[in-house]
Image: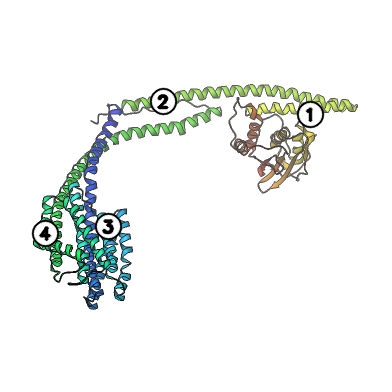
Amino acid sequence: MDNPGRPIRFRITALLLVPIVSLVLLWGFAASLTAGDGMRLLEINTLVEGVATPSEAAVIELQNERLHSARYLNGRSDQDTVVRQRLESDQALASFRRLARSEDVRGTISEEMQIRLTSLFAELEQLPATRALVDSRDADTVRVIRSYDRIIDSMFRMYDQMILVPESSIYQQARSVTALGEVKEILSRERALLSAVGAGGTLSEGEHAALAEMVATRRLAYRQALAKLDAELRAPYERLGGSPGYADFLKLEEEVLASRMLPVDLSPVEQVWVEVERGQVQVVELLVARVTPAAVGILVQIAVAGGLGLVMLVLSVVLALRFSKRLAAELSGLRDMAIQLAEVRLPQLVERLRRGQDAPEEPLPPVEGTPEIRDIGQALDTVRHTAYEAAADQARLRKGVSQVFVSLARRNQSLLHRQLTQLEAMQRKEDQPETLADLYRLDHLTTRMRRHAENLIILSGAAPGRGWRRPVPVVDVLRAAVAEVEDYARVRVLPAPQVSLVGSAVADLIHLIAELVENATVFSPPQTRVIVRAEPTAAGLAVEVEDRGLGVPDAELAELNRRLADRPEFDLADSDRLGLFVVAMLASRHGVQVTLRHSPYGGISAIALIPAAVLAEETPALPS
């Protein structure tokens, strides 16, 4: 299975197919059928221990408190009995609050259940007010009973959210049993009302209406809940319904509703209450007996699915590691070779060819691995060879173009120099002002032509022929740069500091500043001035050329500054940026930092920061 000659597609498929298919199918099946049920079982257990059991105890105590409070309002129970029952209720409620608010319960219950608990706790806050009504003995019996009813009803609404049995049939039976619990609660209300009025007593109109409502609601809910129970769970209630005591209780209800008079014997009420409590306990036990096997079966499914899943997972990991280790080693070697080629060998090759140095061709080492890996290695070597040939051809082409530029520029430079020499001689001999002015204009034009010829030399990477052996004052450098600009009359050179530049850099800096000044005159209105100033700085000397033009957008200005800072490669197709390229070349040659920025007058300020290494200590005059 790990034969290195197999195709990479087979190895990747073998690597991914086993773990993906086994994990997706097995764990997907287990998660969809058992994981959710298992979580419900855990939640059921937490709810039973933390919510259901303590709340049922609290409901029983509240029912007893309601019974004794109703009796106390009618003088049928003493205050000590009520106080003792309240203590029992408070203890049960405190235990319920503590368990329901524990971290285990809060981390397990759903958001809907949390809302029900919050609502229940809010209802429990009304219990002191209900007890105050009882202590004042001013409220009627029905009002007090209904106050307790609202609290207990909140308990049953909470129970609706607690039915989480995974099996659907058991879920339906559990809902019916919960409904029968509410029937028992309504019977408890009847019991409290009848016991409060007492044997032989007479119901008031409000009490009679409340009893009629309780009876109708209990009977309807009882029939609906009983109809949904199966035969086994319905059996205890059917025995109760067929008992003589239950028949006596129904007869008592009818007589009281008809006459509002309570009989002397209220024992059927207590008998039915005892039987209902016993029947409810039996039904709950039968339901729990059904839930337990279902829970055990779910846990068995989870264990089986988890065990098989673990075996498949281990198998998948072993196979994946075995295949991926070798494949990763091959791909890692291929990656390292590609990185070495892209980031080291090719850049070094291109740089050496660009500088005109020899760069022997070195093939890539052979790659071991699958056929696909070997093919990629050969393709990389082919790419390397093609890149080498392209870089060599480009270097040869660039070198040839540069040589042509230098040859043409040197010839033009020689001719222009001879022309300037002749013009100077003619200027010395001429006395006529008009002719002398024409000669000066021709001299200025020839100077500009010489600068353009030097541009070709600079573009080729060579140095211009002009040079000074001695330092030159910066003011003379600025004036010489302005003299090489066509529209020099618009340029104003401000007084410059007593600083000189070394002779070897004078020609290049004159050319650099002349390019900046010419750019300022070309891109500004003809009626405005261009200001040239020089100021010493901590790092050297700053020469600023400021125009009053329209400026350029921020994005274009940022691109221009990037080109000036990075010394871009010369592109024959980018003829519009020759001046910018010349400035960048000259600036990089002497470490000058050229920056363009917006001028306060709306134009552009070009600042050339000349380093201290280019400055000279002495300030001799510029030779004539």
Q: Nearer the viewer, mark 4 or mark 3?
A: 4
| Disc assigned to residue 240 | 4
Give the secondary structure at mark 4. helix
Residue drawn 31% across the image and 33% down it: 327
Q: Say which quarter of the image contains residue 209.
A: bottom left
Considering only order in the chain, which callout, 1 or 3, is on the residue closer to the N terminus? Answer: 3
Inter-mark Cα distance, 2 to 4? 94 Å
| In front of the other: 88 or 448 | 88
Assign the C terminus to one quadrant of the image.
top right
Inter-mark Cα distance, 4 to 3? 26 Å
Inter-mark Cα distance, 2 to 3? 76 Å
| Disc assigned to residue 381 | 2
How many other residues sit within 10 Å of disc 3, few (<14), some (14-19) or many (≥20)?
Answer: some
| Disc assigned to residue 444 | 1
How many other residues sit within 10 Å of disc 1, few (<14), some (14-19) or many (≥20)?
Answer: some
Q: Is residue 389 visible?
A: yes
Give the secondary structure at mark 2. helix
Residue drawn 15% across the image and 47% down it: 297
Measured along the vertical axis of the image, is residue 113 above or below residue 514?
A: below
Indicate the amino acid at tag 4. Leu
Considering only order in the chain, which callout, 3 or 4, is on the residue closer to the N terminus? Answer: 3
Inter-mark Cα distance, 3 to 1? 103 Å
Whether pointer 2 and pointer 3 mark residues with C-beta atoms closer than 8 Å, the reply is no
